[in-house]
Image (cartoon, helix red, strand yellow):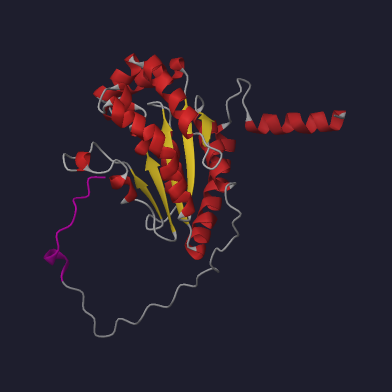
């Protein structure tokens, strides 16, 4: 590398990073905005081509899955891109074929569904916490790869992300949630129990990868210790999974409002207004 090239690299790094290696806020916000604009273009492409897209978000508690999902969806049309975060199965759902309630949430043509946790609950929390039998767990490991191949054969695009966070960073985020009243709701008894069983969850994750990290449907691991980098890297990678084109509609002209001839607005005191406290 020449001296000029080295100088250019240093200039780029100084624009992006602080001296401590963290992303500069100005760069992060500008790049996030740019990537979100690309997500809007991808949305138009998915709708136009009738694609059926499923994206799974799995990983440690407090690994930043929710933050990435929020940044992906905040500029998109919820009729095209929606989030599914299923709760505990009902007594009736517990008697169904395990994948059944997830199948009901799969996309139709022109839709993208983001699963905030998914059928992989069985390989993680259900197995570690003893919410399923050993036989049910073993059956999941056998049938999951075939289930995902069925989805691929049906024309669904399936992308799987695992958010990896270090022991130290998870502890810091848990403590931050405990100290912040606006975040405390994010900590459930199950989250605290998962913290106690760190090694058991690690073993379960390794075994899950051994069975389900297939060539047809691989796991993509996101280094999530730095939330801002994880968000940008994750969105950038998702965009690169599609050879999309810019189908953004032409600029819109606002039509002239019709004249208000013969229209009389009802008296203001006929309506109930929100008090203006601010």
Residue 268, horizontal then vertical, whole percent = 17, 66
Q: Is residue 274 magenta?
A: yes
Give the quadrant of residue 141: top left
Q: Is residue 187 visible?
A: no
Image quarter in which the N terminus is found? top right
Q: Is residue 68 magenta?
A: no
Residue 188, horizontal then vertical, whole percent = 26, 26
Q: Which residues are magenta?
A: 267-278
Say above or below: 110 vs 125: below
Q: Residue at x 40, y 34 (%)?
A: 142
Residue 256, horizontal then vertical, whole percent = 42, 78
Q: Residue at x 29, y 18 (%)?
A: 193
Image quarter in which the C terminus is found? top left
Magenta span: helix, strand or loop, mainly? loop
Residue 180, horizontal then vertical, whole percent = 31, 24
Q: Is residue 69 visible?
A: yes
Say above or below: 103 vs 68: below
């Amino acid at each position: 590398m020449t001296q000029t090239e080295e100088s250019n690299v240093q200039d780029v790094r100084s624009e992006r990073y602080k001296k401590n290696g963290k992303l500069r806020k100005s760069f992060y916000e500008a790049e996030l905005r740019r990537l979100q604009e690309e997500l809007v273009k991808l949305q138009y492409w998915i709708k136009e081509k009738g694609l059926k897209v499923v994206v799974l978000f799995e990983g440690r508690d407090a690994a930043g899955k929710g933050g990435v999902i929020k940044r992906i969806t905040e500029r998109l049309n919820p009729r095209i891109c929606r989030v599914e975060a299923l709760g505990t199965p009902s007594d009736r759902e517990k008697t169904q074929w395990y994948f059944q309630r997830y199948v009901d949430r799969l996309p139709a043509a022109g839709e993208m569904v983001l699963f905030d946790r998914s059928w992989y609950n069985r390989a993680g929390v259900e197995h570690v916490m003893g919410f399923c039998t050993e036989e049910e767990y073993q059956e999941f490991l056998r049938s999951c790869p075939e289930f995902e191949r069925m989805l691929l054969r049906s024309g669904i695009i399936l992308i799987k992300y695992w958010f990896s966070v270090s022991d130290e960073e998870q502890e810091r985020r848990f403590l931050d949630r405990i100290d912040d009243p606006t975040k405390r709701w994010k900590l459930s008894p199950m989250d605290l129990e998962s913290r106690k069983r760190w090694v058991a969850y690690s073993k379960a994750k390794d075994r899950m990868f051994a069975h389900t990290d297939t060539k047809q449907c691989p796991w993509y691991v996101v280094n999530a210790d730095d939330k801002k980098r994880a968000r940008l890297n994750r969105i950038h990678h998702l965009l690169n999974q599609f050879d999309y084109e810019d189908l953004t509609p032409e600029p819109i002209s606002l039509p002239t409002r019709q004249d208000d001839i013969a229209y009389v607005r009802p008296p203001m005191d006929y309506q109930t207004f929100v008090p203006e406290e601010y």
